[in-house]
Structure formats: structure tokens, C-alpha cells
């Protein structure tokens, strides 16, 4: 490569956090493996084709299985991402992350980062030691998207298996398939010959338009989720409140209903100041305020179309700004 061509390459920061993309197994056919053991430099070295795409600068932030992601680590990731994006010599950012909690970290950064530069999360469903490992191709495609001006201003993206998803509505939907990520709204686009082709954009605010920011944000206020099932009782709600939760996402049956047996508990918790958000455990479709529950009378919130996982993060960011129920509902209606 000529010196001029090398200089013209986009400069992409690669922030590695672990996951299966950094996983290794005892053999190429073993089902079990350890996530998060291969370093950022080795991930990059496995894809020499990237040298022609971008000047990629690796950095190891965590080396974890993403089952061990926490609110504190997500904020640490957001802060380091913000620092890198603020640098003049960084044109875009790729985050390698375990797929299990990728949609949560990606969504938090989608709401918090104040940058229009491309930010792309990627990972893998098979460790790098596997026959037909998917990590190298995913990393190649993620860097190709992060290096493209077309990805600027799109919010945080997840690129896996040739598809480009918005962090707002992407969800892990399969425990094993390479095409594990999906969205009820479909992908934003595809990666074709290493470059993004976008076909739609999300209309809800993110990054530069979001009211949320890292400035002045200490810890995330504690918010938990309780998923409903036939015959559920109040114990999990009471335990979360006793542990200090300031909000509880009620991952309700389809349309957001609340079993009669839970009503006294949820009313008492709300009276104690705990915010209750109704979301659908189906993970899709809007919930209507004051339909299937008397939200206005109860002082409860509805999550619109957000999954319980995303509703938890949105409520936590909201509670970091206000405890006013109307203001919190406006966030769910707007984001
Ligand atoms: C993890 O989330 O760290 C393990 C699973 C994966 O990356 O696919």
C-alpha cells in the first residue's frame, strides 16, 4: 500500500470487551468454549483484509463473557467510547461484545453518546477456533460499516451476519443461529462486499438528538425487570423493591395486562415511590396507555413498543433526570 493510500484510510477505534468473538474452544468442533479470552490485537490479526479498509486501532477494555456485563461496566464502556469519538484522529468506532447482552450495551450508548460518528457493535455466535467461525467476517463487515460516511448519524448500529440493525430495536432472538439478531422492524440495511447499503433509518431520537448524556451521570438508578408467567405472585416485585429498586419493569403478558393478584403489591410499591412500567414480554407491538390497566389512576407508565430490556435502561436514564411520572412517560413516548 502506498503511503498516500495508507493515510487516506478511515481511522477506526476498536474497543474489545470479550464475548464469543473472543472465545476459544479445545477443538474446532467442540460445543463448549470460553468467551472473552482472545485479545483485541489477535482478533484484528485474524482479519488481514482489514488493512485495505481502515487503519484499525485496537484497545482492550474488558475481557468478559457478556453475561457478566453490569450497569457500571456499560457506563464505563460508554465513557471510553465517548472519549475515543471525541478524538480528531478517530473517524468511527467498533465495539466487539458478547451477543448475550449486546442489545443492552448498544442501546445505552445509542441514547448517551454525543457523536454523529459511526458506532458499530459486533460479535460472534461461534468462537474463533470453530470450523466456519463467524467472528472474522462480522469484524470485517463492522469495520466496513464504521468506515463508511453512510453510517454517520444513524445512531449505534449492530452488524452481524451481513445485516445492519439499529440498537433501538435489535434483539437477540436465537440461542444458536448465526442470524441471531432481529428486529420487528427489520434491518436498516445490509453489508454488501464489505460496504453498508442502508434502506431506512430510525425516526426516534438518539445520540446527538437525545436528551440523555454522560455529563453529570453517576451510577444508573437501580431498575429491575419481572417477567410474568401464569400464576405469578408478588414475591419478585417485593424483593426488587426491598433491594432498593427505584423502578420495576413489569414484563407483562401480550397486551400489557396485570394479574389481579399483583394489584395490591404494585399499588403499594408505587405509593412508596417505585415506578412501575408496563412492557410486553412478547418484545413487540405498542402498549397503549390506560388500555389493559388504569395507568393514569395508578401512576404507572407504559413502555410503548420497547422490550423489557430496553425499557429498563430507558427508565434508569429517565430516573437519573427526574422522578416525575408524566416526564418519564414522555420519554417512553418519545424514544
Ligand atoms: C457472550 O455474550 O459473551 C457469550 C455469547 C456470545 O457472545 O455469543
Image (cartoon, rainbow, N blue to C red):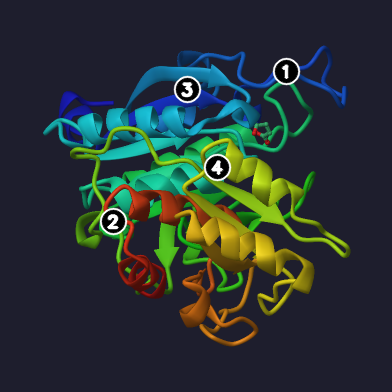
In which quadrant of the rendered image does the N terminus lie? top left
Image quarter of residue 153: bottom left
Q: Quick check: marks 1 and 4 in contact, CB under 8 Å? A: no
Rendering coords of residue 92 (x, y %):
28, 40
Camera-side residue of 208 and 235: 235
Q: Secondary structure at mark 1?
A: loop
Q: Quick check: marks 3 and 1 in contact, CB under 8 Å? A: no
User: Does residue 280 appear in this view?
Assistant: yes
Camera-side residue of 69 and 200: 69
Tell me the number on the disc at residue 322: 2
According to the image, label 1 marks what residue? 34
Q: Which mark is first along the chain, 2 or 1?
A: 1
Q: Residues within 10 Å of mark 3 (few under 14, many from 20)?
A: some
Quarter of image, ligand 1:
top right
Q: Nearer the viewer, mark 3 or mark 1?
A: 1
Q: Secondary structure at mark 2?
A: loop
According to the image, label 4 marks what residue? 102
Rendering coords of residue 151 (x, y %):
32, 56
Image quarter of residue 130: top right
Tell me the number on the disc at residue 99: none
Estimate the spatial distance between the alpha carbons at disc 3 and disc 1, rounded to whole Å: 19 Å
Q: Which mark is first along the chain, 4 or 2?
A: 4
Estimate the spatial distance between the alpha carbons at disc 2 and disc 3, rounded to whole Å: 42 Å
Q: Which mark is first along the chain, 4 or 1?
A: 1
User: Does residue 145 appear in this view?
Assistant: no
Estimate the spatial distance between the alpha carbons at disc 1 and disc 2, rounded to whole Å: 41 Å
According to the image, label 3 marks what residue? 44
> Please, is residue 207 above or below residue 66 in the view?
below
Q: Secondary structure at mark 4?
A: helix
- Kindly identify the residue that appears in the image at 82 percent across and 21 percent down: 28
- Whether the residue carrying mark 2 lies under 8 Å from ligand 1 is answered with no
Amino acid at each position: 500500500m502506498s503511503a498516500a493510500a495508507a493515510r487516506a484510510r478511515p481511522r477506526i477505534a476498536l474497543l474489545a470487551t470479550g464475548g464469543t468473538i473472543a472465545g476459544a474452544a479445545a477443538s474446532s468442533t467442540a460445543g463448549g468454549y470460553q468467551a472473552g479470552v482472545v485479545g483485541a490485537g489477535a482478533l484484528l490479526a485474524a482479519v488481514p483484509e482489514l488493512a485495505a479498509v481502515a487503519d484499525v486501532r485496537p484497545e482492550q477494555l474488558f475481557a468478559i463473557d457478556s453475561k457478566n456485563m453490569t450497569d457500571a461496566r456499560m457506563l464505563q464502556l460508554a465513557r471510553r467510547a465517548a472519549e475515543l469519538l471525541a478524538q480528531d484522529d478517530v473517524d468511527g468506532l467498533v465495539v466487539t461484545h458478547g451477543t448475550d447482552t449486546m442489545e443492552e450495551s448498544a442501546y445505552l450508548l445509542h441514547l448517551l453518546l454525543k457523536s454523529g460518528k459511526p458506532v458499530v457493535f459486533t460479535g460472534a455466535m461461534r468462537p474463533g477456533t470453530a470450523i466456519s467461525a463467524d467472528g472474522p467476517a462480522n469484524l470485517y463487515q463492522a469495520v466496513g460499516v464504521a468506515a463508511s460516511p453512510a453510517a454517520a448519524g444513524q445512531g449505534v448500529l449492530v452488524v452481524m451476519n451481513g445485516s445492519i440493525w439499529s440498537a433501538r430495536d435489535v434483539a437477540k432472538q436465537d440461542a444458536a443461529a448465526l442470524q441471531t439478531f432481529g428486529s420487528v422492524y427489520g434491518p436498516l440495511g445490509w453489508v454488501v462486499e464489505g460496504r453498508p447499503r442502508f434502506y431506512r433509518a430510525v425516526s426516534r431520537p438518539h445520540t446527538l438528538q437525545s436528551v440523555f448524556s454522560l455529563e453529570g451521570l453517576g451510577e444508573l438508578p437501580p431498575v429491575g425487570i419481572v417477567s410474568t408467567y401464569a400464576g405469578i405472585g408478588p414475591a419478585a416485585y417485593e424483593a426488587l423493591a426491598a433491594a432498593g429498586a427505584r423502578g420495576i419493569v413489569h414484563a407483562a403478558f401480550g397486551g400489557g395486562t396485570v394479574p389481579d393478584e399483583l394489584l395490591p403489591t404494585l399499588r403499594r410499591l408505587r405509593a412508596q415511590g417505585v415506578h412501575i412500567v408496563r412492557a410486553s414480554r412478547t418484545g413487540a407491538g405498542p402498549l397503549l396507555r390506560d388500555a389493559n390497566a388504569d395507568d393514569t389512576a395508578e401512576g404507572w407508565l407504559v413502555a410503548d413498543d420497547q422490550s423489557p430490556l430496553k425499557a429498563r435502561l430507558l427508565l434508569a436514564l429517565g430516573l437519573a433526570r427526574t422522578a416525575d411520572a408524566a416526564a418519564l412517560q414522555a420519554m417512553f413516548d418519545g424514544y
